[in-house]
Image (spheres, helix red, strand yellow):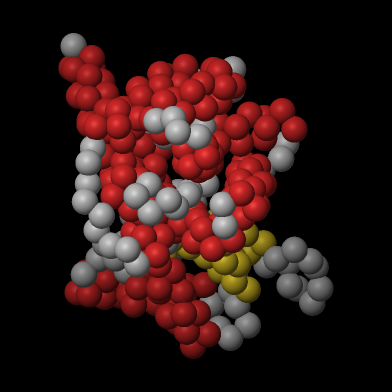
Amino acid sequence: MDSKKSKIIKSLSEYAQIAIGILLASIGLKAFLLPNRFLDGGVTGIALLISRLVDINISLILVVLSIPFLIIGYFTVSRRIILKSIISIIGLALFIHFENFEIITEDKFLISIFGGLFLGAGIGIAIRNGSVLDGSEILGVFINDRFGISIGKVILLFNVILFTITAFVISKEIAMYSILTYIVTAKVTDMVIEGFEDFIGVSIVSKDYEKIKVAIIKELGAGMTIYKGKKGFVNKNENEELDIIHTIINRIDIKKMYRIISNIDDDAFIVEFDVNNVKGGVLRRYLDRKKGEKLANFLSQNPF
């Protein structure tokens, strides 16, 4: 019963957050982009372009254009995502139809930035909760599944075609501002989906691994995983065992990390890689300075 109750609560929370995403996206469209005749990328951009050329309500265009992509998604992604997406797209269309905002600014640069910001935040929140507000993401998943072309490349090509048409049909200036809106939207969407903190993974191989472990814990307070390794060649007794340090830190700490390692072993082998998503474990500075010093002192006296 508790499990069923928790699932219901989780589902309600997801739909509540999707509703917030829809509200933010509709503000971006109705308060910034639509009144000033700016476009965005994807299906939303096509709907905006058609509404500029034909006197048809954009809400209706948005729903109709989304149908083919939802049908594709039915055979590509889970039915639960499609159901949520149908509800989200209809909800967005209704919000756009009934909302009436005063024009906040006529500055084209601000329109591009803030229109993209609100729209990106709304799309990101929806995606985080298992829904999409734009069918171009579904198209990207479908083509990636069938032909192996990356989702990013599909969406990029989709939008290059859209903005090229916009430049010829409407104006080059509108096309350029719309590209700026799309870039802001895409960046904010990524930030909302992946989180505002930018983590990076680091693997360290060094003969002074004990000192480096202690220093990282003491000065960065970062968690780590230790792998047992062995040097990969036999020459002058170099085939020795050592610990390989694997840790995840915030990107802003990476220079300090390099400085810590360099002060101990300037010849240490360091591999740095991007981290898209992290779940579980300890990521932040989980130790205050006193606890970090205590643990560091313990490790220095009791090496693994």
Q: Position of residue 294 (x, y in %)?
A: 24, 72
The residue lying at 61 percent from left, 49 percent from top is 169
Taking 257 as reference, is 119 above or below it? above
Q: From this viewpoint, which residue is outermost toward the right? A: 235
Query: Is residue 3 toward the left or the right of residue 124 in the image?
Result: left
On the question of residue 4 being in view, the answer is yes
Taking 88 as reference, is 171 above or below it? below
Q: Position of residue 232 (x, y in %)?
A: 75, 63
The residue lying at 48 percent from left, 42 percent from top is 52
The residue lying at 40 percent from left, 67 percent from top is 109
Nearest to the observer: residue 190 or residue 9: 190
Image quadrant holding the C terminus, namely: bottom left
The residue lying at 57 percent from left, 57 percent from top is 171
Instruction: Say how many tags the image has.
Output: 0
Q: Position of residue 214 (x, y in %)?
A: 39, 73
Image quadrant holding the N terminus, namely: top left
Q: Position of residue 39 (x, y in %)?
A: 48, 49
Nearest to the observer: residue 277 or residue 62: 62
Taking 57 as reference, is 282 above or below it? below
On the question of residue 222 being in view, the answer is no
Query: Is residue 299 toward the left or the right of residue 70 in the image?
Result: left
Q: From this viewpoint, which residue is outermost toward the front? A: 55
Query: Is residue 179 toward the left or the right of residue 277 in the image?
Result: right
Query: Is residue 228 toward the left or the right of residue 1 in the image?
Result: right
Q: Quadrant of residue 95?
A: top left
